[in-house]
Image (cartoon, coloured by chain):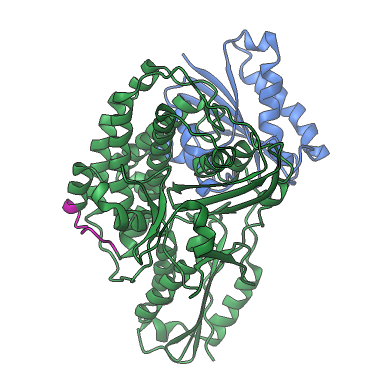
């Protein structure tokens, strides 16, 4: 159980004022909106964490658009100082209960980089299977249970279960499949696995245990195609953006756990140069850092659509065919269609896990040992919601001197604001309730992970 | 025939530790464990709860609650016969916790045969292992009540 959501007293008070001063009738009648219109969504439902949206419109022109994250600041980077390199991945995994792999494996990779450890191919493959599990469980939970109700005009997954039981059953079984993949390799725990370590695993899973997942994965491929096809029938808001897409790229496969950083604006750099090209800065209205590219300070896009746009060619035939059947081209610039891309990636993740499990042979070596040295290491993986960056400086005994972790949601935050700006600009003729829902849907396109959740919405309108 | 006891909550979040603490206590009681009850602490994540209890014969759950009732008060819900209020048993992950999982399972027809939930009204859900004194007292009462649920075994 978590603490109760904060009561949005301010917003309530403002809403009262708004009701008095600003009869919403004129807006609902879709008359041109003049004067100042303030849209405030203080707490978002079906988003991992607490986020708030503030938009001020004057004479039909947006004057301010802030998407703020009111996450309690995370002190991980500070309290990792002095910790042994061996402890770090298990600690960083606790940053998120939805995508612990991103923090676990990013940190492992960085430590291996620092210590000069080269892991073996079977260890690589096992990590990739686990990460496929995380993509499956995270993508399906978000797409089917949290995002799909928006498109269907339903309040939540409970209503979805009442109207379409089969979809929910399929989604829950897929989520379990993802969790089971994590458990079978991670040592019986899906959320914060205990069997993983710097250099590999404490114990590798048996061939038999992994092969036991094959039938369910075969079912998973079909089930995710079914869900993709269903979601492909949704009506998507007409909105596109010329995104600066940033993702990992690997020459051999659709990048998940490793690769170089590439972008559709010509960037191709090793992970260690990431913060030479991209930066994080603090803004007064949010406790999460904002990512942008250095030089122009412009936002960029991380996540499923960025990966798809940059690495489409490396998807499997079946994933590409699914994409085509649900109306996706090789480039998707409509953020609302991220729900479709997530399902295409789920098809891919099921196929990829199946392929790797078929080829799996139990290795003799469960992990590669390394010697601590004064060094610096970098790691990056593709969390379900986008690239997650780690860098650590270690002393000669392998203790952390400095830690830097960039979460995908912090990186995407400025781009979410840009999308909101564009969406609001095109949707000013909607009444408040519809506009609020459109804004929520826009934020949910990013499956933002901002750490604990609330189920209240407050829209404030003020006109002068 | 699966008979489950789930102590839901987080040991490191003050009053929310009441569920897992009781699970620890029951698991350490050899005489109780001879009854064949599967005792587990649980985070409260809804989807895994649903998978755990599906097909079970009998399930008893203890979780901290924030419903506005008197601090430390205990409520017994027969989940098979009465719907649970949304958001009373909170869990941070995308707000899909015990109450939501119960209602979802009801929709899908996957509730166990019997399911009793004890909710203990908490106050402090901040970091730390110490529970409010009133909740610590309630833990003893709820332990008695839980044992009573299994006394026929």
Residue A453 shows in the view? yes
Q: Position of residue A294 (x, y in %)?
A: 51, 70
- The relative height of residue A402 versus residue A410 in the rendered view (above or below) is above
**B69 or B102, nearer to the observer:** B102
Is A205 positioned to the left or the right of B119 in the image? Answer: left
**B73 or A238, nearer to the observer:** A238
Q: Give the residue drawn at x 68%, y 19%.
A: B26
Q: Position of residue A339 (x, y in %)?
A: 33, 54
Identify the residue at the far right of this view. Answer: B133
Q: Give the residue drawn at x 50%, y 22%.
A: A366
Residue A456 shows in the view? no
Q: Quadrant of residue A115?
A: top right
Q: Position of residue A4 (x, y in %)?
A: 64, 52
Q: Position of residue A245 (x, y in %)?
A: 37, 62
Which segment is the magenta one?
A324-332
Q: Main secondary structure of the magenta part?
A: loop
Q: Give the residue drawn at x 62%, y 56%.
A: A5
Q: Quadrant of residue A398?
A: top right
**A70 or A344, nearer to the observer:** A344
Q: Give the residue drawn at x 69%, y 26%.
A: B22
- The relative height of residue A342 versus residue B137 in the rendered view (above or below) is below
Quadrant in the picture for the C terminus of chain B: top right
* Colour assignment, chain A: green
- The relative height of residue A24 versus residue A302 in the rendered view (above or below) is below
Q: Is residue B31 magenta?
A: no
**B142 or A332, nearer to the observer:** A332
Q: Is residue A329 magenta?
A: yes
What number of labels is visible?
0
* Colour assignment, chain B: blue
């Amino acid at each position: 159980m978590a603490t109760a959501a904060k009561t949005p007293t301010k917003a309530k008070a403002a809403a009262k004022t708004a009701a008095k001063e600003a009869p919403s009738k004129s807006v609902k009648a879709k008359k041109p909106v003049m004067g100042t219109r303030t849209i405030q969504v203080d707490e978002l439902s079906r988003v991992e964490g607490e986020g708030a949206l503030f938009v001020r419109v004057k004479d039909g022109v947006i004057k301010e658009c802030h998407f703020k994250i009111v996450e309690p600041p995370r002190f991980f980077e500070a309290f990792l100082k002095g910790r042994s390199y061996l402890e770090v991945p298990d600690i960083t995994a606790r940053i998120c209960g939805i995508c612990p792999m991103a923090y676990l494996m990013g940190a492992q990779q960085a430590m291996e980089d620092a210590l000069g450890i080269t892991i073996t191919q079977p260890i690589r493959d096992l990590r990739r299977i686990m990460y496929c599990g995380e993509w499956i469980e995270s993508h399906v939970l978000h797409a089917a249970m949290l995002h799909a109700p928006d498109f269907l005009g339903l309040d939540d997954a409970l209503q979805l279960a009442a109207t379409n039981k089969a979809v929910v059953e399929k989604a829950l079984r897929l989520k379990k499949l993802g969790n089971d993949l994590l458990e079978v390799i991670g040592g019986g725990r899906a959320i914060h696995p205990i069997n993983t370590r710097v250099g590999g695993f404490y114990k590798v899973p048996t061939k038999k245990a992994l092969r036991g997942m094959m039938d369910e994965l075969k079912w998973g491929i079909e089930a995710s195609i079914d869900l993709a096809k269903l979601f492909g029938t949704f009506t998507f808001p007409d909105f596109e953006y010329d995104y600066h897409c940033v993702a990992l790229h690997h020459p051999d496969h659709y990048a998940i756990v490793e690769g170089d950083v590439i972008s559709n604006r010509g960037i191709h750099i090793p992970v260690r140069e990431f913060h030479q090209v991209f930066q994080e800065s603090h803004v007064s209205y949010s406790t999460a850092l904002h990512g942008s590219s250095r030089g122009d300070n412009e936002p960029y896009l991380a996540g499923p659509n960025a990966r798809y746009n940059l690495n489409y060619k490396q998807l499997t035939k079946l994933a590409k065919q699914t994409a085509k059947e649900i109306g996706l081209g090789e480039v998707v610039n409509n953020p609302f269609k991220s729900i479709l891309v997530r399902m295409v990636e789920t098809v891919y993740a099921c196929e990829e896990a199946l392929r790797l499990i078929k080829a799996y042979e139990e290795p003799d070596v469960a992990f590669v040992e390394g010697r601590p040295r004064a060094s610096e290491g970098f790691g990056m993986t593709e969390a379900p919601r986008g690239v997650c960056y780690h860098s650590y400086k270690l002393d000669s005994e392998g203790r952390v001197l400095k830690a830097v972790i960039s979460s995908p949601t912090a990186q995407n935050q400025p781009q979410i604001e840009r999308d909101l700006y564009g969406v609001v600009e095109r949707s000013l003729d909607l009444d408040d309730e519809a506009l609020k829902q459109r804004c929520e849907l826009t934020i949910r396109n990013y499956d933002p992970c901002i750490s604990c959740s609330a189920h209240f919405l407050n829209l404030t309108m003020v006109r002068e | 025939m699966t008979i489950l006891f789930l102590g839901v909550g987080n040991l490191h979040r003050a009053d929310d530790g009441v569920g897992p603490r009781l699970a620890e206590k029951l698991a350490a009681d050899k005489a109780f464990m001879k009854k064949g009850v599967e005792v587990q602490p649980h985070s409260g994540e809804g989807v895994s709860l649903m998978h755990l209890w599906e097909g079970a014969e009998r399930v008893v759950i203890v979780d901290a609650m924030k419903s506005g009732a008197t601090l430390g008060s205990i409520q017994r819900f027969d989940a098979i016969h009465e719907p649970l209020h949304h958001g009373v048993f909170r869990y941070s992950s995308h707000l899909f916790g015990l109450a939501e999982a119960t209602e979802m399972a009801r929709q899908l027809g996957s509730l166990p045969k019997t399911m009793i939930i004890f909710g203990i009204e908490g106050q402090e859900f901040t970091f730390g292992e110490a529970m409010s004194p009133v909740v610590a007292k309630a833990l003893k009462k709820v332990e008695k009540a839980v044992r009573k649920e299994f006394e026929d075994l």
